[in-house]
Amino acid sequence: MKILAIDTSSKICSVSVLEDKNVIIEKHNDDEKTHSQKLMPLIDEALKESNLSLDNIDLLACSQGPGSFTGIRIGISTIKAFADVKHIPIIGVTSLESLSYNIKTEGLIASLIDAQHDNVYFALFELKENNYTLIHSPISDNINTIITILKSHSNPITFVGDGAVVHKELLEKEFTNCHFASNIENAQTSISIGLSAFDKFHSLNYEPSYTISPIYLKKSQAEINLEKKQSENID
């Protein structure tokens, strides 16, 4: 099975082509402001250097977020266009789940993405016998609330994501039996999107889909500002 995976949910625009769980090629660009300009050329390069075209792709995989609102929309609209034209099934993967796939040590994996102002996007997974199981669904909340949730689990925890980097000092104080991912493991990548999509495709409850929706977990700043303005006008 050949998989085209993309991730535009962070400042890194990443494109990968996989054969099952083997990476054929990976391309990336770390300028978030040019995702709309860089994504299609990266896809074209990845396919050409793999001697493939969209006609050879069996599965499309894309990050659904949370993360950059603009980046997520760019990635999803691109992958949906491919699915419409070529009738290739799509699997969406949260950016929190893709981060968990960067960790290969068995045990609990807490994925944390910085959402600013002491808030994080969070999800908890468990890796056992090469299977990643969702333990706590993705949420957006204050880091102290996340700490309270995690304290109900006694197993060793591996923290991954830029949210873990931002709050490392606090987490180290609260958890004595924990580990922190390396800089490389903290980076969101389309490779992990592809690996997760492969597992989802082969799961017992998988049903082919040809569309995908974003997962934001919280309102954009534009929406917040609009609601605030509308509230002021009513008052």
Image (spheres, rainbow, N blue to C red):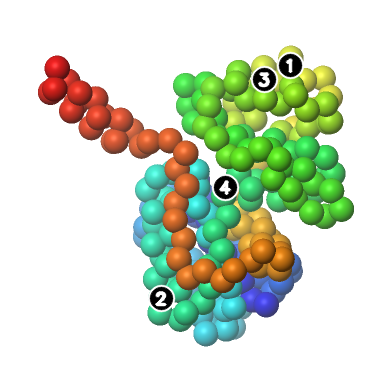
100 relative to 229 in the view: left or right:
right
Q: Secondary structure at mark 4?
A: helix
Are the two marked residues, 3 and 2, in contact with CB atoms closer than 8 angstroms?
no
In the picture of the structure, the residue carrying the numbered disc 3 is 148
In this view, which residue lies farthest toward the front? 205
Amino acid type indicated by mark 4: Ser
Whole-number angstrom distance, CA of label 4 to CA of label 2: 23 Å
Q: CA distance from mark 3 to mark 1?
A: 10 Å
Of badges 2 and 1, nearer the viewer stands 2
Between discs 4 and 1, the one toward the N terminus:
4
Residue at the disc numbered 4: 95
Q: On the rendered image, what quadrant is the N terminus found in?
A: bottom right
Q: Are marks 2 and 1 in contact (CB under 8 Å)?
A: no
Numbered disc in front, either 4 or 2: 2
Which label sits on residue 174? 1
As shown in the figure, which amino acid type bears the numbered disc 3? Thr
Q: CA distance from mark 3 to mark 4?
A: 22 Å
Q: Residue at x 75, y 50 (%)?
A: 132
Q: Residues within 10 Å of mark 1 (few under 14, many from 20)?
A: some
Q: Counting other residues with Cα less than 10 Å from the Cα at mark 4, is it few (<14), some (14-19), or many (20 or more)?
A: many
User: What separation in Å lies between label 4 and label 1 (alpha carbons)?
Assistant: 25 Å
* Cα gap from disc 2 to disc 1, whole angstroms: 48 Å
Pointer 2: what residue?
Answer: 84
Across and down, in percent, residue 49 comes to: 58, 77
Q: Residue at x 56, y 71 (%)?
A: 208
Q: Amino acid at mark 2?
A: Asp
What residue do we see at 78% from left, 37% from top?
108
- The circle drawn on residue 108 is none
Q: CA distance from mark 3 to mark 2?
A: 44 Å
Residue 202 in picture, x, y percent from top left: 71, 68
Residue type of the residue flagged with mark 1: Glu
Q: Earlier in the sequence, mark 2 or mark 1?
A: 2
